[in-house]
Amino acid sequence: MFTAHHSLEDTTVTDEDKEAFREAMSGAKPLRADDRMPVEKPKPRPRARFGRADESAVLSESLEDDIDTIEHHSGGALRFHRQHVGRRIMRKLTRGGYSVQAEIDLHGMTLAEARPRLRDFIQYNAEQDRLCVRVVHGKGLGSGERGPVLKSAVNSWLRRWSNVIAFVSTRQVDGGTGAIYVLLQRD
């Protein structure tokens, strides 16, 4: 995506612009300190009565288990494989044992933008004989009540494409449930 940025150096102020500004400002007078809008002091933030105790309990709980285990048991993890893909391969994929040879980040894309880009990415990498790629789809935290829209769509699309033989949510260090490792069928 290309975004044009303008700096002040790009803008030329003509004499005509200066004269128009002076004319517009001719009757303006500075405000006296008494006429200015009063500044309201910010209200103190509400504090939960048991906030610290609750935070401490959550922290203790989180330290008891590995973050990958927590995420994978939360129902947010994706997992798929074709019948001919064995347990050993899936275990290796889940542990991040394959070298990721390419990556695509779909964050912020609409479904209409993401589908063809992902399709082209998968097709191109399969043609290049790449075995493992990573797809970053996000966790859908910005989707509100609709849930993870892009994540669900990616899950559905990849299952339909024949050159995708397996995928799983990544390890936490590679994006957790916001990304997946994808195994491709070599052509």
Image (cartoon, rainbow, N blue to C red):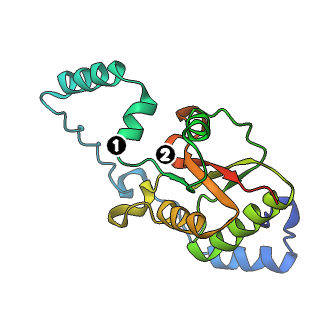
Q: Which residue is mark 2?
A: 177
Which corner quadrant of the image does residue 107 belong to? bottom right
Q: Nearer the viewer, residue 128 or 177?
A: 128
Could you tell me if residue 27 is visible in this image? Answer: no
On the image, the x and y values in percent for residue 84 come to 60, 53
On the image, the x and y values in percent for residue 118 come to 68, 65
**From this viewpoint, which residue is outermost toward the front?**
84
State the mark number for residue 74: 1
Q: Is residue 117 above or below residue 106?
A: below
Q: Mark 2: few, some, or many residues within 10 Å (few <14, many ≥20)?
A: many
Q: CB of mark 1 within 8 Å of CB of mark 2? A: yes
On the image, the x and y values in percent for residue 94 come to 56, 38
> Which quadrant holds the N terminus?
bottom right
Who's the residue at 37% across and 34% down the image? 70
In the visual, does 32 lie left or right of 187? left
Who's the residue at 70% across and 69% down the image? 119
Which corner quadrant of the image does residue 162 belong to? bottom right
**Amino acid type, label 1:** Ser
> Which quadrant holds the C terminus?
bottom right
Q: Mark 1: few, some, or many residues within 10 Å (few <14, many ≥20)?
A: few
**Amino acid type, label 2:** Thr
Who's the residue at 14% across and 27% down the image? 50
Say whether disc 1 or disc 2 marks the residue closer to the N-terminus.
Answer: 1
